[in-house]
Amino acid sequence: MTRLQLCANSPEFSRLAFGTWRLHNDAEAATPQGLLERLRACLDAGITTIDTAEIYGLYRVEELVGQALALDPGVKSRMEIITKAGIYVPCEFHPERKVAFYNTTADRLVKSAEKSLRFLGVGTLDLFLIHRPDWFTRHEETAAGLNQLMKEGKIRAAGVSNYTLSQFAALSRFVEQPLATNQVQFSPFCMDPVFDGTFDQCQGHGISPMAWSPTGGGRLFNEDDEATTRLRQCMAGLSAKYGGATPDQLCYAWILAHPARPMVVIGTNKIKRLRSAAAADAILLEREDWYLLTEAVRGRKIP
Ligand SMILES: NC(=O)c1ccc[n+]([C@@H]2O[C@H](COP(=O)([O-])OP(=O)(O)OC[C@H]3O[C@@H](n4cnc5c(N)ncnc54)[C@H](OP(=O)(O)O)[C@@H]3O)[C@@H](O)[C@H]2O)c1
């Protein structure tokens, strides 16, 4: 598995990360032992990075990850942890909340990061992301929280998720260490970062983006709309050339091949599929095949 520094001052991560958003969709995965088995499978396949967030599982996933890691210090010592903060919704722990809201004030970020450290049972977070831009907080204020966490050694690097170009540029003005990444939705089904300037900005800043929902949230497997059907047919046509690659592998390979060098956050809870995903790192899609897949999903000739 290729290793990657998201920017010059970032820790090293595996090119594919294990995403934990959907853990509670799978009763087997959502237990400390079940999760530990998945983490072991990840490590065997070279996936050493976990992507989680304060809000996942309505604030229950980080604690579950901590419980799984506590079962095996050997696993824990080999994994890097990425987490995110800033989204607050009414839930069983917070029935007093009237509405979902964002909060990326310095005080909130520090409290959230400290809670993540406690739940995950680690001394430092390898990467801490602002989960979504907060429309009600000044960028200078958000940066103060990130700067404090860096100075106190509670996080090794800071970045953002779902930020627009201007939000990224504004926050960048105030952080003392460059932002390490922008984690955005990217897949053959969602090419927005290619066209809205996000990937150009990342290249300009010398950082790698992270791609979430790489299979379109499972659309590649579950939907029969025209674009998905064309994409699957195109993948079937390319499979033999790439050693019998499966649709998920070709999908991840398509993302990995983008010159912005994205990290891929995979979303499967199935051990077999985690292993298969990891093998995609070795598939080097040729230029024309990348465009062939792109044309298939877009349904029109490349102009
Ligand atoms: N920053 C953000 O705002 C943000 C937003 C969304 C997600 N994320 C991160 O990105 C990660 C991945 O996102 P995602 O869960 O949407 O990823 P995804 O891969 O696009 O979708 C995962 C879904 O696809 C299914 N799937 C995957 N491989 C399959 C296969 N080979 N055959 C059949 N079904 C398959 C999974 O089911 P099975 O489990 O049954 O395989 C799961 O239901 C999340 O866990 C989270 O860490 C971040």
Image: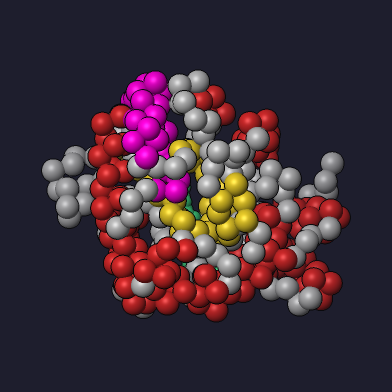
| Residue 186 in view, yes or no | no
- When the figure is inspected, residue 122 is found, relative to residue 249, above or below; the finding is above
Name the foreground residue: 275 vs 96.
Answer: 275
* In the image, farthest residue toward the left: 96
Instruction: Kindly indicate the quadrant of the structure image that contains residue 89.
Output: top left
> What residue do we see at 63% from left, 31% from top?
205
Horizontally, is 301 left or right of 173 in the view? right
Residue 273 rendering spot, x and y as whole percentages: 56, 74
Horizontally, is 119 left or right of 245 in the view? left
| In magenta segment, residue 128 | yes
> What residue do we see at 21% from left, 52% from top?
91
Magenta range: 125-153
Residue 214 rendering spot, x and y as whole percentages: 58, 57
| In magenta segment, residue 211 | no
- When the figure is inspected, residue 296 is found, relative to residue 130, above or below; the finding is below
Instruction: Kindly indicate the quadrant of the structure image that contains residue 38.
Output: bottom left
> What residue do we see at 46% from left, 61% from top?
79
- How many tags in the picture? 0
Name the foreground residue: 156 vs 144.
Answer: 156
- When the figure is inspected, residue 257 is found, relative to residue 148, above or below; the finding is below
Quadrant location of the N terminus in the rendered image: bottom right
Residue 284 rendering spot, x and y as whole percentages: 78, 61
> What residue do we see at 31% from left, 43% from top?
113
| Residue 61 in view, yes or no | yes
Residue 163 rendering spot, x and y as whole percentages: 50, 34
Quadrant location of the C terminus in the rendered image: top right
Colour scheme: secondary structure
